[in-house]
Amino acid sequence: MVHDIVCYSHLRWRFVYQRPQHLLSRFSTEHRVIFFEEPVYGENDDHYEINKEEEKDIWVITPVLFHQENNLSLAQRMRSILDAVLNKLQVKDHIAWYYTPMALPYSSHLDPLLIVYDCMDELSAFKNAPSALIELEKELFRKADLIFTGGHSLYQHKKSQHHNIHPFPSSIDQDHFSLSRTITEDPDDQAHIPHPRFGFFGVIDERMNMELVREVAERMPDWNFILLGPFAKIDPDQVPKLKSIHYLGQKTYNQLPTYLSGWDVAMMPFALNEATRFISPTKTPEFLAGGKPVISTSIRDVVEPYGKLGLVNIADTGDEFIEAGKKILSGADEGSWWVDVDKFLSGNSWDKTWANMKKIMETTMKANQISKSDKTRAYV
């Protein structure tokens, strides 16, 4: 019997296309996926919106709560909506897949066949993180049958907290991003920007070192910096506003290879702070699959393995960034770099990640069934 997967996420399905979308889209080829988002607030009574993804067995649920206080707690109101959704979709035996521990107060009454926590980030270190998150994550670690982590550094940080924990760093859809190597067209809003171009796509938030971008842009006025993506948790009016820095807004996942194809260098100017201490940027292999040399600050999961293997240039200061940029633009890094990149990426794909996760889930479910059977016999 194929079981439904009920996912609880702090990220919205139609936000930036990243790890949850990659994995759950693949799971949806074999399972119905119910993607339960955090609530939004409106003027009407509590209700929910339900939307099915085209050509995928993914049902996106957005709870809509009346903004005024009432006598019921947030958890009770969310639990009522969750129960109504599961009843409407006739969900019975299911796998619970958590991206956020904040869902525990309204979902812990359920009895799923398997509880998985895909711990993709150290969420408690992010700006505006809820005060209850740390304790709820401890509870989720106690309840979960299985933990995945979004990278090796996060795995090292968490591995002592659970007996069944496995690292799964960022993967790639190589066929998608390798299109950048052959695309020659330039999008209208990028076509007018002179070369050389240094590009980034992703969420522009407190994890970005925008002062580094500002410094390099001021010192190298002939270089142009293109940033694609939405702003989150930072004021767009406070980011550097220079003629050579271009904020082109959020693009769809399908548009990214076309923009990437027109860059000379891809960059990951992340700040080195608590919010980035354990991140494993998905864009690292995506940029490389697109055939672009990369300059990144010294994020641990980028330095190891990409930096140490010479696949990515590491630069934390303006001087280091400019030196790396000049070297790349001179062509000094070419040589066997392409061959080394392709060899490394050949073993990296979301399909393989999904398949390996699925095997571990199946093994864990079988072990759970044996354990429950043994306990039942012990009481006979």
Image (cartoon, rainbow, N blue to C red):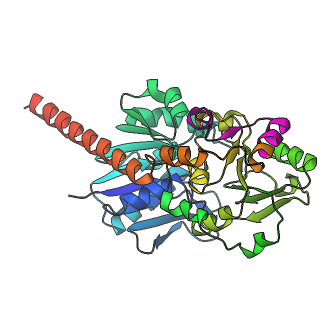
Observer-nearest residue: 96 or 43? 96
Q: State the image coordinates of residue 37 (x, y, percent, origin top left).
A: 52, 58
Q: Quadrant of residue 35?
A: bottom left
Residue farthest along the top direction in this orientation: 160
Residue 272 located left or right of residue 164: right
Q: State the image coordinates of residue 296 (x, y, percent, origin top left).
A: 70, 42
Q: What is the magenta range?
A: 302-325
Kindly tell me whether residue 82 is visible in this rendering. no
Residue 289 located left or right of residue 329: left
Observer-nearest residue: 122 or 167? 167
Q: Give the residue drawn at x 45%, y 23%.
A: 160
Say above or below: 367 vs 283: above
Residue farthest along the left direction in this orientation: 380
Q: Give the residue drawn at x 37%, y 47%.
A: 109
Observer-nearest residue: 336 or 283? 336
Kindly tell me whether residue 280 is visible in this rendering. yes
Residue 380 located left or right of residue 175: left
Q: Quadrant of residue 131?
A: top right
Q: Give the residue drawn at x 72%, y 60%.
A: 263
- Residue 91 is inside the magenta segment: no
- Residue 317 is inside the magenta segment: yes
Q: Quadrant of residue 264?
A: bottom right
